[in-house]
Image (cartoon, rainbow, N blue to C red):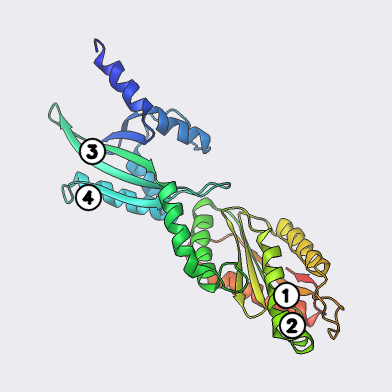
Amino acid sequence: MENSFEFLNLVLDSVTEHIVVIDVTGDILFVNKGWSAFGIENACAIGDDWNGVNYIEECDKASAMGDEFGKNAGEGIRRVIDNKEPLFYFEYPCHSPVEKRWFMMHVTPFKTHGKNYLVISHQNITERKLAEEAVGNQARIDGLTNVPNRRAFDEFLHDEWRRCIRLNKPICLGIIDLDYFKLLNDRYGHQSGDEALKKVGKLLKEFSNRPGDICARYGGEEFALVFGDTKLEQAERLSNNILGKIVDLKIGNENSPTNKYLTASIGLAEISPIRGQKESELIEKADKLLYRAKNRGRNRVEC
């Protein structure tokens, strides 16, 4: 232990938490290896050189862009600095394009040599949150098709909308209506109709594998697909692919004027949301485009 400073650095670099130390003005004085590595791996604009960066100002910048984490973090840190709270912590999502992640932030003050400082740590709690989510998801799954239900869709779209505002990313929504589904029920019976819904739900799940995507049963014979961080051109290609695969299921609907097999119509809309906009605007656009697709002959995508 001859060099206690080096020893302490090695200890802090070995822990899995991301740790930063700031003074009462918010200036960063120290980050551990986990903090720097996370910034580099997630394409953080600051990179691995945090000298001269003010943590509170970075939180305020994120808050100004609609980021709830930035708002909560900045307010919590200030409450600790002002001695309004002895410490501060909260849980927040930090999903990447390829995986879901959650962290817990802790802010703890300390004093040395007559000066006040704060140590801030971010602990990965993804494993616990995924377990909690799995339990909660049971109430958000449609019992017939085994895809998320309308409640899950509303919650997901709200969260993904805020993420796209924060990151200045586009979001696409496709509302899918099965063409002449009543004729299928009338001809083959409601049990056959239920089996058709199950097959379509299973197919649509194949198109929602990323954290920013969801397939949900929207109601009756309608489904919804959210494509986060996706341009309209790409979403249109995926939607046309979906139409072809629905026909390929060869679900009989011989009384349909469109095709002897079950088909679908899709209204597809894209928005790059900004603060002040609501996700209902995207739903309204997609819904109007769905009716256009139905009025123009069905078995088509309107976007």
Instruction: Determine whether label 2 and label 4 are within 8 Å by CB.
Output: no
In the image, taking residue 99 as reference, residue 86 lies left or right, namely: left
Secondary element at tag 4 = helix
**Residue 285: x, y in percent?**
64, 73
In the image, taking residue 190 as reference, residue 54 lies left or right, namely: left
Number of residues whose C-alpha sits closer than 10 Å to that of mark 3, classed few (under 14), some (14–19) or many (20 or more): some
Query: What is the C-alpha distance between the residues marked 1 and 2?
Result: 9 Å
Q: Which residue is mark 2?
A: 181
The quadrant of the image that shows the C terminus is bottom right
Q: Nearer the viewer, mark 2 or mark 3?
A: 2
Secondary element at tag 3 = loop
Query: What is the C-alpha distance between the residues marked 3 and 1?
Result: 62 Å
Residue 196: image tag? 1
**Residue 18: x, y in percent?**
38, 36
Residue drawn at 25 percent across, 48 percent down = 88
Instruction: Determine whether label 1 and label 2 are within 8 Å by CB.
Output: yes
Q: Is residue 46 visible?
A: no
